[in-house]
Amino acid sequence: TASRFMSATTLIGDNIHNMQGESLGDLKEIMLNTSTGEVAYAVVSYGGILGLGDKLFAVPWKSFTIDYANHKLVLNVSKDRLKDAPGFDKDNWPNFADPAFATSLGSYYSG
């Protein structure tokens, strides 16, 4: 398939849906691995009202697909699975470079 390119600002703030069409929150940040230049994680915000009380989740970028026709990100996970995912507070971000962090997230979203 042909490569597709999109700017990060095009995706930031976009709503994320699962395969059933349910809203899973919105994209807050895209985390780059500056050693490789690859997108490593998407930071998803879910659960708050007007940005208050929401929980942030780091989701491996490879867990997403992009629905180009409808201009939205798709994450193949149920709402309940996302609610139970390891999350973090907006003032206490995880160490994305920690290999244990990467391993635990990878196994959570692939299983």
Image (cartoon, grey):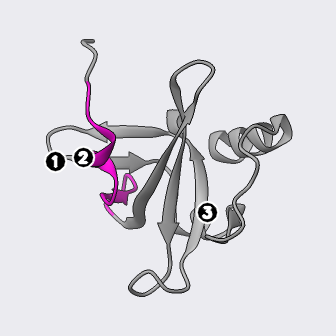
Q: Residue at x 66, y 71 (%)?
A: 91
> What segment carries the magenta color?
5-21
Q: Which residue is mark 3?
A: 81
CB-based contact (under 8 Å), mark 2 and mark 3: no
Amino acid carrying mark 1 in the image: Asn
Q: Which residue is mark 2?
A: 10
How many other residues sit within 10 Å of disc 2, few (<14), some (14-19) or many (≥20)? few
- Label 2 – label 1 distance at C-alpha: 13 Å
Report the side of 78 relative to 104 (left or right). left
Q: Is residue 106 above or below residue 17?
A: above
**Residue 13: % across, % down:** 32, 60
Amino acid carrying mark 2 in the image: Thr
Amino acid carrying mark 3 in the image: Arg
- Outermost residue on the top side: it is 1
Q: Is residue 102 above or below residue 16?
A: above
Q: Residue at x 75, y 37 (%)?
A: 97
Q: Residue at x 42, y 87 (%)?
A: 49
- Label 2 – label 3 distance at C-alpha: 26 Å
* Mark 2 vs mark 3: in front: 2
CB-based contact (under 8 Å), mark 3 and mark 1: no
Q: Which residue is mark 1?
A: 70
* Mark 2 vs mark 1: in front: 2
The foreground one among 111 and 60 is 60
Is 14 contained in the magenta span?
yes
**In which quadrant of the rendered image does the N terminus lie?**
top left
What kind of element bears circle 3? helix
